Amino acid sequence: MSLADKSVFELIVEKHTANLHAGFRRWSEEMGAPPPALGDYRWTDDLILSTWYQAAHGHPPQDRLEYRVGRSGGGFDVLDFNFLPESQWLPENTEIDLSLPLNRRGDHLEKISIPLPIYGGGMSYGSVSEQVMLSRARNAAHWGTFTSTGEGGYPRSLTEYKDNVITQVATGMFGVREETIQNARIVEFKYAQGAKPGLGGHLLGDKATQTVSEIRESVPWVSLFSPFPFHSVYSVEDHRKHVDWIKQTNPRALVSVKVSTPTDVDMVAVGSYFAGAHIVHLDGSYGGTGAAPEIAKKNIAMPIEFAIPRVHRYLLSEEIRDRVTVMASGGIRTAWDIAKVIALGADGAVIGTSELVAMGCTRCSNCERGRGCPFGLTTTDPLLSQFVQPDWGAERLNNLYTSYATQLKDILRRLGLRSIAELRGRPDLLKYVG
Amino acid sequence: MTDNPNNNGNGYHRFHIVAERAPDVEKWPSRFNVRVRRSGLAKLIIKELLHYGPRNKDVILSRPCLYGVFSGPVGGFMPRDQHCVGCLRCTTEFPDFVRVSHNPERRKLGDSFFDFRVVDSVTYEAESGLIPVKGAGYRGKFGGEGWDGMWTDMSEIVRPTRDGIHGREFISTVVDIGARPNFLMFDEEGRSVGRTPHVFQIPLPLLFDVLPKSAASERTWRITARAATELGTLAVIPIGAVLQYNLESDHVAPLVRPGEKDALPVLEKAPRLIEMDGWEEGLYRAIHTAFPESLVALRIPFTSGQELLKFARKGIRVFHLTADYHGRDPKGAFVLDLIRRAHKAFVEAGIRQEVTLLGSGGIIHAEHVPKAILCGLDAVALDTAALVALQARFHGECRDRETSRFSLPRKLTLAWGAQRLVNLAASWRDQLLEIMGAMGLREVRRLRGEMGRAMFMEDLEREAFAGVNGYEPGR
Ligand code: SF4
Ligand code: SF4
């Protein structure tokens, strides 16, 4: 198509998209120094740029950029691996198994296994664009892993990827329908979210567009606060009823329970298991969000680094550790964080923010402002959302996952381990560098 | 007005703070500096003109900024920094000639403790009365000392519901100020004998502390007094200023220093609370004699449990404990630990229910209020946060209560100042509700000293990193 055949809208999209793509490459590869205002303690400029780099190349940068840790001064950032001396590393061509079974209950349901210990966390339609959801779904399908709808309903375009999409049932029940539950191989109950534990979802009015509200079955341009908690669940027994309801609707589905990290997170995990969960998904307090009160992000509930060992040990003591899959999320930024959280006791990790960063997020915190994300990620603005085309987004995510898989294998090789399962609950393989 | 803040004399009314926008009166430096190399921009325009042709003016004029930084009369040739929100799209698109950096001038606001990030939050809260809500996750340090090393609990399944806390359900933020015996005694006829409760209530656990000398003026005293009245709480104001500016009211607690005994009889009415600045037996007796129905608060720097119990034995039931503006005592202990120590002393003596602990110093952020209450305070008297709400500038490190220097905006008016403080209180109260809602608590009195619902970095790290090579607890 020549210039003359294109609409102004198309030309504007094309111009900015090209500039942005070139910018991601130039800042992560060519410019001598990072953009001066980029990054924060958790997601440093180096981490953001190295994620851009990995999303372009499928492997971590060779020099210059620190791609493993941030500068938060705690948690993952003060942990490193206690690698074997180089002479004892496994050879480079060793087969390393990164696969993770998601159903360990020993029931008759599908024995789903994913080829690497990662899947994508819930990001709702409305908080992110349909294009972003599609990018994530395509990548999940490519890898044979999963992504989650979040609580904003199920855009029709996702149906094509339904085998790799987890349907989330959250307290707002936005867009939850029988067919979207029946679509899913895994249904996830979101009890709480790490970035706003105890507060429920939050979609500001500007982002509740006509289409978003149609899918969510709500009123356009009115802010949506998901209630907290589930009004029908005030005990483990009520939760069990909830699970039964899903099983009635879709008897095939595995059940994941996403909870936050209160003081009694260990009890919550055990309770979830006994209520029928296949996956207990713990979302620590430093996780991502499209909008949350600042006070909630830092102060409520504990970081995932502290919650996982507590849960792991408790499940061990209850002798049910091998009957449930524990997924960790909330501030897991890198392949190294994934490996560390597994060493602390999780089976795998759920990621979200790093996927957005791979598609261009600068972590500027303006997701909730006006038209939404200027990079087209956390927005449903018709123009902005065009900046992330699903093919491009899926390619970026595929590269990121490739890079993560390579790094995870490399970490295991240097620890002398042949599978990711062997790393679980091995704090002795970590060292404290605080 | 009755003593019950939820009863206005005509029965129950729901406590609600009316926040109204009160925009900054002083222009503060922008958060970001946006620099555009003009030759680079000119070249881009020429290139795009040649590429798209003049027919596609809208494409050429389509700029990366959504926030109006390049929407002034000459566009990118003169960026309007004050609109920049630091999204970095411009510099991502044009790495060669657009640079966005943090404005060092903005970062000079506040001081090393009350840093510019907290200044930003407090300013927003005072301007809008709203809870700061942002996208993306937490950006700060993992944990750290003091308040940063503490997390509050939440519950996955308990009431009150979150959709209810700002709506149809109610979380009470009422606190009792005063003295309450541990138990009541009755004689054979069922008449109450012995001590009875001597308390009044304020509708939220926030008071306004006495202002430092450099910020004290008739205008600022009137502002704190009016804000306290509108909120139904208390402002602590020196008795001299109370008398000089005619500020006596139910919402002003006169602060009486040793040597000011003679001012007492000049007060027209018994205040609900009188603060005594440091212990002086004679002054304490004089206050009691002049106003037997008033509660007397002892204002003293945080001190040992033994000392506090000594004053309790002398009859003090309300303590206003102060740390310096950075939250430290002279030995360097932090206010969080100081509060815990004070609370524990009264718990161990079996009289925690009998006393009220107010605290000031180092409590500068909305999140510090629930944390301070969890550690054992009943209520917080705001100091530097109130000054920042009024757009005070710090001159150097403002740590010492006596000598710190603040300057206030020249355009400070009574109505604006009072509204800013009311807005701040509205925002902080709503944030307190968020925390309590997440914990499943229905009243702030139950939050006090509820240490089982607090988590400390030291404890969590010790448990989680046990078994990690090289980890030594408390190192
Ligand atoms: S607005 Fe900023 S933080 Fe939010 S997704 Fe976009 S780039 Fe990331
Ligand atoms: S950083 Fe974002 S807000 Fe600031 S000038 Fe650039 S595009 Fe505009």
Image (tube, grey):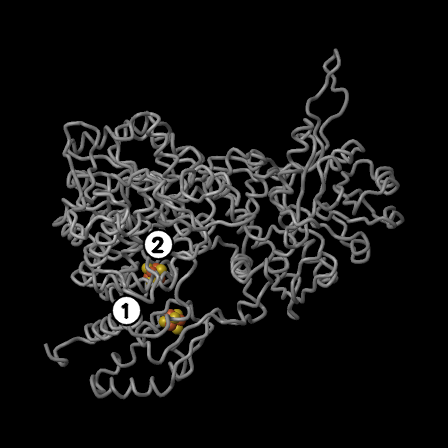
Q: Nearer the viewer, mark 2 or mark 1?
A: 1
Q: Chain of mark 1?
A: A
What residue lies at 53% left-to-right and 69% top-to-bottom? B106
Question: In the image, is residue A347 above or below residue A220?
Answer: above
The amino acid on which the numbered mark 2 sits, given as a three-letter code, is Gly
Q: Is residue A372 visible?
A: no
Drawn side of residue B371 relative to residue B234, left or right: left
Q: What residue did someone put label 2 on?
A: A290
Quadrant containing ligand 1 reads bottom left
Image location (x, y in percent) of residue B257: 82, 49
The amino acid on which the numbered mark 1 sits, given as a three-letter code, is Phe
Q: Quadrant of the N terminus of chain A?
A: bottom left
Question: Element type at marker 1?
Answer: helix
Between residue B220 and residue B99, name the one nearer to us: B99
Residue B403, located in which quarter of the rendered image?
A: bottom right
Residue B41, located in which quarter of the rendered image?
A: bottom left
Q: What residue did someone put label 1 on?
A: A24
Drawn side of residue A115 relative to residue A299, left or right: left
**Cβ of mark 2 under 8 A from ligand 1:** yes
